[in-house]
Amino acid sequence: MILTDTHIHLHFPQYDADRGEVIRRALEAGVGLFVNIGTDLADSRKAVAVAEAYPGVYAAIGYHPHESKHASAPDLTELEKLLAHPKVVAVGEVGLDYFHDHSPREVQRELLYTFLQWQKKYGKAVIFHCRDAYDDLLKILNGTVPIPCRGLLHCFSSDVATMEKFLELGFYVAFGGAVTYRKNDALREACRRCPADRLVIETDGPYLAPQSKRGQRNEPAYMIETAEFISRLRGVTLESLAVSTTKNAKEFFGLC
């Protein structure tokens, strides 16, 4: 059984003291593939460096919407060069975050258009961060991207109706530890009804540990708890869920 963590920040300082052990524990737990996510130029370089250092670890490069206001033209030029790296499998995480508004919304939207142009130019998968901005993201995507769009909604946090709009565009949907949290019925229903060929699993480590470890540093080994929860929710075995979600991840990121 091999599970794939489609969204992890293994290069973050929370893992500096025991990064190798974190990966070892993940492998022992059955998590064998990882996509390490960058959030700005310097951070993306660190994400790629960790991917270079460990088999089974790949990288995505981008600007988190919080960091959009810091994305200068020279930095974007340097970031774009990283797309040629053999271990870079996606642009991300990129998108819109209207919950915190750490960057002006118009700046977030303008930068997102840049990354969507990269998708057209390079044919890379795109990992989208979206919080309290699903309607605006849909408006940008409709008429901008080819359909089906090679997009993935990271850490999905909405409902079935919203999910279905993105599924119509060809998206994959990632569920993480939040699906295990109490009083999250709408998210659980979306997870239950997500088509089997569009569902992937993530940790978003070091954040969003599953319910039994909530508040602790998250790590890929804990994804087993999330996967077991999802398998029960969907009425399938853990093994079959691992097979289908890893197949989906490999197809999405071009790892087949």
Image: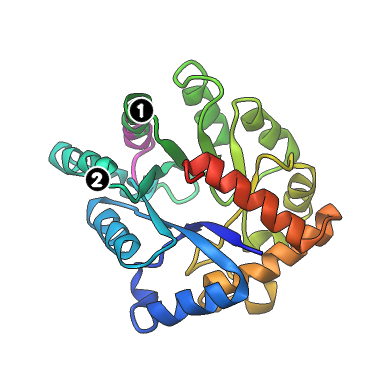
* Residue 66 appearing in the image: yes
| Magenta region, residue range | 102-111
Q: Residue at x 24, y 45 (%)?
A: 82
Magenta span dominant secondary structure: helix
Q: Position of residue 70 (x, y in %)?
A: 23, 47
Q: Is residue 75 magenta?
A: no
User: Farthest residue toward the top?
Assistant: 143
Nearest to the observer: residue 94 or residue 232: 232
Disc 1 crowd, CA 10 A, few/some/many (<14, 14-19, 20+): some
Q: Residue at x 53, y 40 (%)?
A: 252
Q: Pointer 2: what residue?
A: 82
Q: Amino acid at mark 2?
A: Leu
**Circle 2 or circle 1, nearest the eye:** 2
* Residue 129 appearing in the image: no
For label 2, the SS is: helix
**Residue 216 against residue 94 in the figure, above or below:** below
For label 1, the SS is: helix
Disc 2 crowd, CA 10 A, few/some/many (<14, 14-19, 20+): many
User: Farthest residue toward the right?
Assistant: 235
Q: Position of residue 34 (x, y in %)?
A: 48, 60
Report whether 65 appears left or right of 233.
Answer: left
Splitting the image into 4 quarters, where does residue 166 fall?
A: top right
Q: Residue at x 52, y 27 (%)?
A: 149
Q: What label sits on residue 95 in the rendered view?
A: none
Q: Pointer 1: what residue?
A: 113
Q: Position of residue 210 (x, y in %)?
A: 65, 70
Report whether 37 appears left or right of 73.
Answer: right
Nearest to the observer: residue 11 or residue 245: 245
